[in-house]
Image (cartoon, rainbow, N blue to C red):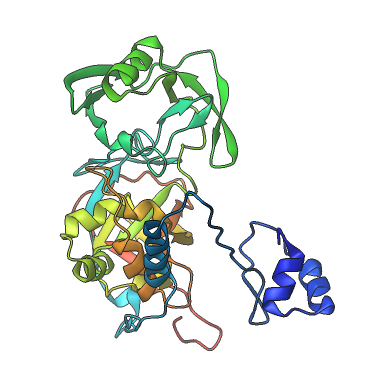
Amino acid sequence: MCNMGACQMHLGLSDDMLMKLSAFGKECGDQMDLVDGIPTGVVRISFGRLNSEKDIDVLIQMLESCFLTKNPTEILPAPKPLNEYSPIITKLITYPIKSCMGISFDSIECTSTGLKYDRNFMISKDGIALTLKKNPELCRIKVQIEDTSLLLTSDIDDVGIQVDLHEDSQSKDLSKLCGRQQSTSSCGKTSAKWLEESIGYEQCELRRIPEDSDQSLSNSCPYLLVNEASIAVLADVINLSLEEALLRFRPNIVIRGIPPFSEDHIKFLHIDRAEFEVVDKCTRCEMICIDSETGVKDPNMIVALRNIRYKQKMTFGIYLRQVDDTKCTPNIGMNVKLEEEILTNGKSK
């Protein structure tokens, strides 16, 4: 807690409760919002002489959209065990440049760091990766792969530049990415000049991970899988097309053939002869509000997800990692075999 006295006063916490929170490891900025059902912090809104009624209206709209309880969307359990379904892969998407547009493939190789080419490049400034959440202009960069080159174009430059996919500079530096540091190398002055002239990014550069790196520039795990039926539920709620809604979640693998949100209970899955383990669910933030085509933010998606995940973390999609060394090249239409987590009483979770 940043201001323990104010929190104690507004929440009516005893001194003993404050000591208990401290013993639990409660600190400013963590995710420990409740302890024994009791809130651990408060939010203060400050107004000054430069604020207007419009600011108050925006605040009220935010509170109504994000915090007032509405009737949650009911999620029905799958009518049969997941291993009795035969889902298929409907999309395979790789994102060569972090936070830029993805490229769909009919077939693509799985590697130790994710789908081939996925998040091997990033755009950085002062050693820190730019993200779509803070830099919506990234949606203006169009990415293609041609033979052994990465082709970058923009809305004002349809010729663009080519960057060698395999050229690996000997000069490497540490770049900061989501709180961690990772070794990267510059793609040179030509790409930096293009970013400035075509996107307006001054003092930025295109950087890449070493070819022998054991980790891509993804935030968490090598693969993100989503269920087409779950996307359809959200798309219907906010009146988006399935394709538009899908792009908001930036998945690598999309499957069809299981009930909505039943992917939450997958423990392992098999693609061809390779085995993948579910590492975690993907917790979502305002990134899903950004239209990846225009960069415009629309809060309806996160509100819809909040209503579905009533009183739960706002997760959507599952993180995967391959648990064996089997070579795997999935393709569109390929069947996926699922294993469901089993509880000790023998029932599916």
Q: Nearer the viewer, residue 39 or 265?
A: 39
Q: Position of residue 315 (x, y in %)?
A: 43, 65
Q: Eyeballing the image, is 27 above or below 340?
A: above
Q: Eyeballing the image, is 46 above or below 73?
A: above
Q: Position of residue 8 (x, y in %)?
A: 74, 73
Q: Residue at x 40, y 50 (%)?
A: 223
Q: Nearer the viewer, residue 192 or 87?
A: 192
Looking at the image, the residue that sits furthest to the bottom is: 345
Q: Position of residue 263 (x, y in %)?
A: 36, 69
Name the side, left or right, on which 214 lies relative to 239: right
Q: Which quadrant of the figure has residue 117?
A: top left
Q: Nearer the viewer, residue 106 or 291?
A: 291
One can see residue 338 in this view: no
Q: Which quadrant of the figure has residue 246?
A: bottom left
Q: Position of residue 112 (x, y in %)?
A: 45, 41
Q: Nearer the viewer, residue 176 or 78?
A: 176
Q: Residue at x 32, y 69 (%)?
A: 304
Name the side, left or right, on which 5 lies relative to 215: right
Q: Eyeballing the image, is 249 above or below 132?
A: below
In which quadrant of the rendered image does the N terminus lie? bottom right
One can see residue 73 in this view: yes
